[in-house]
């Protein structure tokens, strides 16, 4: 076909941030996938709970300390995380460098306490179905903590290289911050499930 | 920032057409050699590979179907023993659903969506490559296991307790469960790509009401994949955990529940039917409009019915479980919702009939398949309304009535439109036409053969013949019809064989197609056949739903994209207004390496939970290699 110029796009930026970035939408789509996964495992928990004559069956409820501490650490990390996202949006490389290092530390901390959570469940995965589902819930969320930590570490290293000073990279930082918020927010219903539904 | 940048980087509009083409080819053409073939990220090449692989699996699954029909042709068939027979029907079903039907529909989307919305590559092209390799690995896992006589033997839905640690000995059920993980991972990746491609890469001016119906269908399908597939991944992972590390999700003795597996499976399994069917609706809408020579009747009702079906499909899963003793209220709810979904499906059928009625139909092969679809799918839909009713379902559950029903829905509702779609888009994919004469023969043989094969199965089911039996006694009244079915299936096989013959023959020496052999209205026909690696020289600018019918001679295009890096346009979600000149990732070997590492981890984890730990390290390395910037011009800005 013959072509007729109808629109000049030469003045557009080479990369969009936020909803103008395909990566941002891709992150949202993956959050939808994983959010559905979390919701379904919680549904499995509630389903098994509805069948059981007593809940938790043959085990004391999980000890609160470790899980509550993880919750507090995760919630506290949201504030610097939002700041980091804002610095990235502003393209402030110095602050972003500080932010990614800080977030590397802040996302390692809950992972360390998480190790104690498994022991605090007071049940093994192979004791009964209750044990299986709480281990699955905790394991699934721990996988997310771990992958996002690795992601953050790689990004932190990247921000100290010559590849750092591009709007694409700042977009990556924002998307990673968005994902961390997701990991924190999904923890809250899981926390309620594991620690408080076993106490009602 | 762009004022000076324009001087340093030549734009397409500043160059003569030949020079522009040369430069575009230099940056977009795939790399050569074996390493190059493993590094390709062009959606057309990956889409073609995906489609071809899916059809190979169709043929393999067809061979198993033939074995089944030979076995059941006469009472007390001796071809297959019970153990092999169990593997044969399990692999047939799992193969057709997970390795053929879903992947082939997504593959058509991978090939067509970027062309139909006027962009240069799919979003996340490397993820697309990764998805294909994972899919191939999952298919190989199933078939190699089957050929080594440890193929799964637990039915395509792998119900516990049969598939659980108590009865499912060896690794057969694990093969099934892990094949699921592979194929769902591949499907989820493609779903994300298609959603983002449709949301963000539509040609400027392609507002929501100008999106081609096939693209709408793929968008809704992708959302179904995103919400449905996690359920089966959880079910299959929990099954592997029960089998490998002694969890008790499905063990009633320790507080688990076998029906939990069925709930999770069908929460995925029912939307799965629509994941296969909705793309077919999109294909039918597209082909109907072209061959009826008018815009499709009821664009808006068709879009609404796609979305309605998508939403309702999550409210029907328990109708697969009517015989498990659900609470009465639940049964009533799921009966009502199962019948309700017939309403949007009916709207679609009436829109299709109205389009034909009001148009001037040209009976080329694609339209013949559409006609075969309308008749066959309607019959399948009617038996669907029947089995939605609890008393009737209780009677025919697990009989050949259900086998007949779902083959009518899946083959009639999806494979016929797909074959039509191959006749329709083959010229675009290869630059050559398929044969009209052979096409008519294929349509006739497949349509007649299918109905003669599967209609009698309704009767067999009503006569009480259960599914999945490897033999039946001569005293039972099923012999005559089974022989008839087996003989009729020869016609069906002949039709498929002729289809493959036509594909191969046409690929080698079909008549040259030209850009738009059908005089179709959508953007994929605005470029050459086959399209160049960059799809469109200038990104089209859209002003209506049927751009090529408004002006078949001249294409309005956007100018100003660079020719020294892979660049495409990102536009806003609703109104498709240009937002950025985004880069598109170039070829890379890392997705292939990541897929190999993932394969090692997933197969290892059938045997040891520690494979998840040590297997994750190479995956992490591969992913870092994948995403680490290498100073390519695509990484600028």
Image (tube, helix red, strand yellow):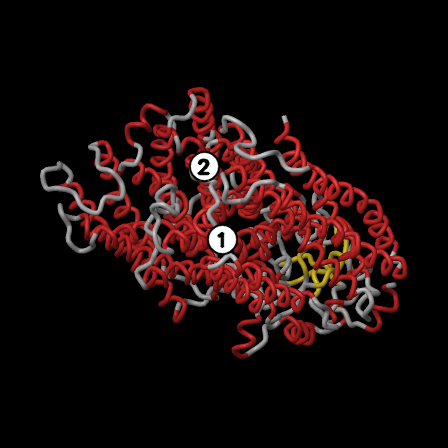
Is there any visible trace of residue B170 in the rendered image? yes
The N terminus of chain B - image quarter: bottom right
Which residue matches tag 2?
B254
The C terminus of chain B - image quarter: bottom right
Left or right side of B159 for B32: right
Q: Name above or below for residue B464 compared with residue B622.
A: above
Name the subunit of mark 2.
B
Q: Earlier in the sequence, mark 2 or mark 1?
A: 1
| Disc 1 element | helix
Query: Residue B179: which quarter of the image?
Result: bottom left
Is there any visible trace of residue B290 in the rendered image? no
In the foreground, B22 or B39: B39
Residue B11 percent coordinates (x, y): 76, 69
Discs 2/1, front: 2
Which residue matches tag 1?
B181
Name the residue located 36 percent from the left edge and 54 percent from the top edge: B172
């Amino acid at each position: 076909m013959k072509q007729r110029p109808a629109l000049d796009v030469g003045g557009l930026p080479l990369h969009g941030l936020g909803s103008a970035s395909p990566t941002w939408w891709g992150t949202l789509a993956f959050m939808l996938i994983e959010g559905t996964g979390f919701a379904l495992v919680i549904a499995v928990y509630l389903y098994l709970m509805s069948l059981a004559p007593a809940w938790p069956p043959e085990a004391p409820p999980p000890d609160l300390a470790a899980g509550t501490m993880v919750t507090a650490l995760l919630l506290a990390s949201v504030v610097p995380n939002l700041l980091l996202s804002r610095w990235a949006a502003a393209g402030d490389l110095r602050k972003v460098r500080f932010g990614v290092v800080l977030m590397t530390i802040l996302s390692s901390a809950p992972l360390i306490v998480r190790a104690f959570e498994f022991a605090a469940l007071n049940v093994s995965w192979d004791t009964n179905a209750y044990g299986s589902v709480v281990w699955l819930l905790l394991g699934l969320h721990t996988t997310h903590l771990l992958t996002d930590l690795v992601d953050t570490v790689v990004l932190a290293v990247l921000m100290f290289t010559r590849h750092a000073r591009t709007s694409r990279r700042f977009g990556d930082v924002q998307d990673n911050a968005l994902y961390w918020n997701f990991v924190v927010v999904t923890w809250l219903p899981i926390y309620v499930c594991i620690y408080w539904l076993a106490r009602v | 920032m762009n004022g000076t940048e324009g001087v340093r980087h030549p734009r397409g509009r500043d160059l003569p057409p030949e020079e522009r083409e040369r430069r575009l080819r230099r940056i977009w053409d795939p790399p050569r050699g074996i390493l190059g073939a493993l590094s390709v990220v062009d959606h057309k090449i990956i889409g073609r590979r995906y489609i071809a692989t899916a059809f190979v699996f169709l043929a393999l699954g067809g061979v198993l179907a033939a074995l089944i029909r030979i076995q059941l042709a006469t009472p007390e068939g001796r071809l297959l023993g019970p153990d092999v027979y169990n593997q044969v029907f399990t692999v047939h079903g799992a193969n057709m659903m997970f390795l053929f039907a879903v992947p082939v529909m997504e593959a058509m989307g991978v090939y067509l969506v970027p062309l139909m919305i006027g962009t240069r590559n799919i979003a996340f092209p490397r993820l697309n490559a990764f998805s294909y390799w994972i899919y191939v690995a999952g298919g190989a896992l199933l078939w190699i296991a089957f050929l080594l006589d440890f193929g799964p033997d637990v039915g395509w839905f792998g119900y516990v307790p049969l598939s659980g640690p108590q009865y499912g000995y060896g690794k057969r059920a694990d093969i099934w469960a892990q094949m699921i993980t592979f194929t769902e991972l591949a499907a989820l990746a493609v779903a994300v790509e298609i959603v983002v491609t449709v949301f963000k890469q539509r040609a400027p001016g392609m507002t929501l009401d100008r999106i081609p119906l096939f693209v709408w269908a793929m968008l809704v399908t992708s959302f179904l994949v995103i919400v449905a597939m996690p359920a089966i991944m959880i079910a299959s992972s929990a099954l592997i955990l029960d089998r490998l590390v002694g969890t008790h999700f499905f063990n009633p003795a320790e507080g688990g529940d076998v029906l939990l597996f069925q709930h999770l499976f069908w929460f995925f399994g029912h939307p799965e039917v629509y994941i296969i069917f909705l793309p077919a609706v999109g294909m039918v809408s597209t082909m109907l409009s072209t061959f009826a020579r008018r815009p499709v009747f009821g664009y808006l009702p068709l879009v609404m019915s796609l979305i309605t079906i998508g939403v309702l499909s999550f409210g029907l899963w328990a109708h697969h479980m009517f015989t498990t003793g659900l609470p009465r209220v639940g049964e009533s709810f799921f009966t009502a919702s199962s019948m309700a979904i017939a309403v949007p499906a009916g709207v679609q059928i009436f829109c299709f009939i109205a389009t034909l009625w009001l148009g001037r139909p040209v009976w080329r092969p694609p339209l013949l398949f559409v006609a075969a679809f309308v008749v066959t799918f309607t019959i399948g839909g009617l038996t669907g309304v029947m089995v939605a009713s609890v008393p009737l379902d209780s009677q025919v559950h697990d009989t050949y009535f259900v086998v007949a029903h779902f083959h009518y829905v899946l083959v009639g509702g999806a494979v016929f439109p797909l074959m039509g779609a191959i006749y329709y888009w083959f010229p675009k994919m290869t630059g050559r036409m398929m044969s009209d004469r052979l096409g008519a023969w294929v349509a006739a043989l497949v349509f007649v053969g299918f109905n003669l094969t599967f209609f009698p199965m309704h009767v067999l089911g009503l006569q009480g013949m259960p599914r999945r039996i490897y033999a039946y006694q001569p005293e039972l009244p099923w012999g005559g019809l089974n022989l008839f079915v087996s003989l009729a299936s020869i016609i069906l096989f002949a039709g498929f064989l002729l289809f493959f013959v036509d594909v191969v023959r046409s690929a080698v020496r079909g008549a040259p197609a030209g850009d738009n052999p059908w005089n179709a209205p959508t953007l994929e026909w605005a470029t050459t056949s086959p399209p160049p690696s960059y799809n469109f020289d200038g990104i089209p600018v859209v002003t209506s739903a049927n751009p090529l019918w408004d002006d078949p001679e001249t294409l309005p295009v956007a100018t100003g994209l660079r020719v020294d890096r892979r660049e495409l346009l990102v536009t806003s979600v609703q109104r498709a207004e240009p937002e950025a000149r985004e880069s598109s990732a170039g070829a890379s070997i890392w997705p292939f390496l990541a897929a190999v590492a993932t394969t090692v981890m997933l197969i290892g984890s059938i045997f040891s939970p520690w494979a998840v730990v040590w297997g994750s390290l190479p995956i992490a390395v591969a992913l870092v290699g994948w995403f680490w910037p290498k100073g390519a011009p695509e990484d600028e800005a």
